Image (cartoon, rainbow, N blue to C red):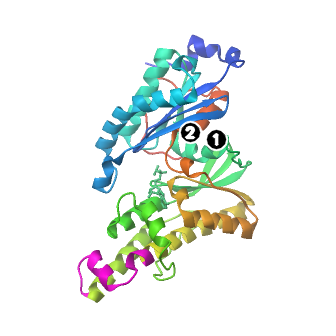
Amino acid sequence: MQINLCNSKKCCNFAAEMNKKVVILAIESSCDDTSAAVIVDGILRSNVIASQKVHEEFGGVVPELASRAHQQNILPVVDTALKRAGVTKDELSAIAFTRGPGLLGSLLVGTSFAKGLALSLGIPLIDVNHLQGHVLAHFVEDGTGLKHPEFPFLCLLVSGGNSQIVLVRAYNNMEIIGQTIDDAAGEAFDKCAKVLGLPYPGGPWIDKLAKLGDPTKYPFAKPNIPAYDYSFSGLKTSFLYTLRDMLKAHGVETIDELAQNVPNLREDMCASLQATVVDILMRKLKKAAKDLGVNQVAVAGGVSANSALRQAFLDYGQKYHWTVFIPPFSFTTDNAAMVCQAGYFKYLDSDFCAIDEVPFAKTTI
Ligand code: KG4
């Protein structure tokens, strides 16, 4: 059965509504953060995030536990977002939700909640691609005077599940011109951190320890992949083999034993890994910017919190005359503010979705 909410009476009155406030509630539940945000007339009024600590002891996100935690969190998170924004649910113009990519069970919680609320209020539903949300985080008006890129710009989108170079021609016109053919950059950080015995997620730990290490100590393998695509599986193997060879050379079996024999082991391994990942990411981005003649360059996604990557953006910007856009930390990891921004743009385009649209686990932009 095809029921399209945007064909409902309320939506037919959309044009008439244009004189009213546009109030968008967004819900993000693609992985292990339950988040809700509200934008009123283009201004972010609230962005509430409940992170799930339950996964830490397992060294990675456990999908079933993530879905259950979303079920528990979603009502209080949405309620808090509305209260902080100073709006009631009856004032909402539309509800945006992350449709994918992500963990299906997690997405189902946010999707079902959004559908139920939109149906009960008789307002349009807006589906948002999580990756487009990350890119559009650069347009959030949060009152801090964030600079917005001009079109066209390049966005390096780096997270736990993605490493892509996106050519952004407009809010609703994006093309992936390069992407990883195997692991994502965040995945490489997390997996290597696990080998070193660091907690999950490992990316922030690598960043922290790298500050105390020598980035040139261990020369890891770099991929040789054509065009603008990435690969991180060879680097991961190179990292693993370096440790394996050192364990053998020192006649020990565990990383803790090795660390007693090799001063600054973890710090130097982290610094060398981080420097290699940043170099791989930036070289391809530089090539894309040069080939396409684009000098507005942005970074987005969880790995954009990495201090060396942020510094590399500033350095490349200065050296190659780019205008660079680095998101505030609050918009690097998963958050509903970015979904709300994407939803707001879609609302202005009257780009709504049907009530029977289903979430998707994998997709491109
Ligand atoms: O975008 P995100 O929150 O989730 C998705 O994958 O959608 O990204 C999470 C990734 C994890 O791999 C995490 O280790 C990484 O971002 N990350 C970092 C840092 N902070 C988070 N990686 C390196 N340095 C950081 N400071």
Is 81 or 364 nearer to us in this picture?
A: 81
What residue appears at the point 66 percent right and 48 percent down from the top-left corner?
168
What residue appears at the point 28 percent right and 76 percent down from the top-left corner?
256
Pointer 1 with pointer 2, Cβ within 8 A: yes
The numbered mark at residue 258 is none
What residue appears at the point 42 percent right and 60 percent down from the top-left corner?
187
Give x and y (percent) for residue 358: 43, 31
The amino acid type of the residue labelled 2 equals Ala
Dot 2, crowdedness within 10 Å: few (<14), some or many (≥20)?
many
Is 359 or 136 nearer to us in this picture?
A: 136
What is the spatial separation of the Cα atoms under label 1 and label 2, in whole angstroms? 7 Å
Give x and y (percent) for residue 319: 73, 70
Q: Secondary structure at mark 1?
A: loop
Vertical order, 188 against 105 (above or below): below
| Quadrant placement of the C terminus | top right
Give x and y (percent) for residue 42: 67, 32
Name the residue that disc number 2 marks: 337
Name the residue that disc number 1 marks: 140
Q: Which residues are magenta?
A: 251-268
Q: Is residue 66 left or right of residue 186?
A: left
Q: Is mark 1 within 8 Å of ligand 1?
A: no
